[in-house]
Image (tube, rainbow, N blue to C red):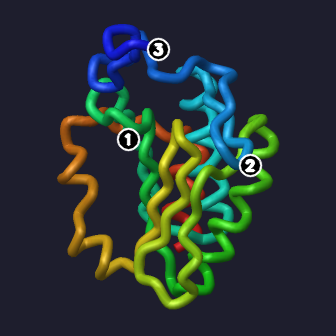
């Protein structure tokens, strides 16, 4: 392929992704279409709430981030609880016909990450979350409205 024929990743737009829906990246992670990625991000948020993570938010960063469409951020009570919460996301991914692309596995970390290509999940110890303040970093993104039932459960079960 000549230099002229090579695709330019920087020229991609949300309507023209670098990888098409249904494409598979290494480790079996599959690219989801936009609606499927949003449903997946909300399913991840629900799983995190079920695992007692707090202050879970979903941010739509399509058109802002060149590498993902949605960011899910939550806080955990301990490194062990956050790790277990990330482990449970394998089941959520399988239900959405995808899998994790990369996963942080440091058991003593204050910040854990799961990259599903279309959705990137960040779990923080509350102090680390406040320090890194990803919500401010991605303030140009659009917060996805969580279902009312999920918001109620998140606030009720504290």
Residue 124, image quadrant:
bottom left
In the rendered image, the residue lying farthest to the bottom is 108
Please give the name of the residue rendered at 58% of the width and 76% of the height, measured from the top-left corner: 105
Which residue has dot 2 on it?
Answer: 92
Q: Given this view, does label 2 or label 3 mark the residue nearer the observer?
A: 3
Instruction: Using a 10 Å C-alpha cutoff, classify the residue at mark 3 as few (fewer than 14 neighbours), some (14 to 19) or many (20 or more).
Output: few
Question: Alpha carbon of mark 3 to alpha carbon of mark 1: how far?
Answer: 37 Å
Q: Position of residue 106 (x, y in %)?
A: 54, 82
Residue that numbered label 3 is attached to: 1
Splitting the image into 4 quarters, where does residue 66 fall? top left
Q: Nearer the viewer, residue 54 or 121?
A: 121
Residue, disc 1: 59
The label number, if any, that marks residue 99 in the structure image: none
Q: Which residue appears at 48% of the width and 49% of the height?
A: 120
Q: Is 118 positioned to the left or the right of 140 in the image?
A: right
First in sequence: mark 3 or mark 1? Answer: 3
- Residue 13 visible (yes or no): no
The reply to whether callout 2 and callout 1 are in contact (CB within 8 Å) is no
Apparent side of residue 74 relative to residue 10 in the rendered image (left or right): right
Number of labels in the image equals 3
Q: Residue at x 62, y 20 (%)?
A: 21
The residue carrying pointer 1 sits among few (fewer than 14), some (14 to 19) or many (20 or more) residues within 10 Å by Cα, namely: many
Q: Earlier in the sequence, mark 2 or mark 3?
A: 3
Measure the C-alpha gap from mark 2 to mark 3. 38 Å
- Rendered view: 59 above or below 46: above
Check disc 3 and report its element: helix, strand or loop. loop
Closer to the camera in the image, 6 or 158: 6
């Amino acid at each position: 392929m000549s230099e002229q024929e090579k695709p330019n990743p920087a020229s991609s737009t949300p309507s023209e992704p670098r990888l098409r829906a249904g494409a598979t990246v290494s480790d079996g992670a599959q690219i989801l279409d936009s609606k499927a990625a949003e449903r997946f991000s909300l399913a991840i948020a629900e799983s995190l709430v079920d695992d007692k993570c707090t202050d879970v938010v979903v941010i739509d960063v399509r058109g802002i981030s060149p590498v993902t469409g949605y960011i899910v951020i939550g806080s955990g009570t301990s490194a062990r609880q956050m790790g277990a919460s990330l482990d449970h996301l394998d089941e959520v991914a399988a239900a959405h016909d995808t899998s994790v692309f990369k996963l942080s596995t440091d058991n003593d970390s204050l910040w854990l990450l799961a990259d599903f290509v279309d959705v990137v999940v960040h779990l923080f110890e509350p102090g680390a979350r406040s320090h890194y303040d990803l919500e401010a970093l991605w303030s140009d993104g659009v917060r996805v409205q969580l279902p009312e039932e999920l918001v109620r459960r998140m606030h009720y079960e504290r």
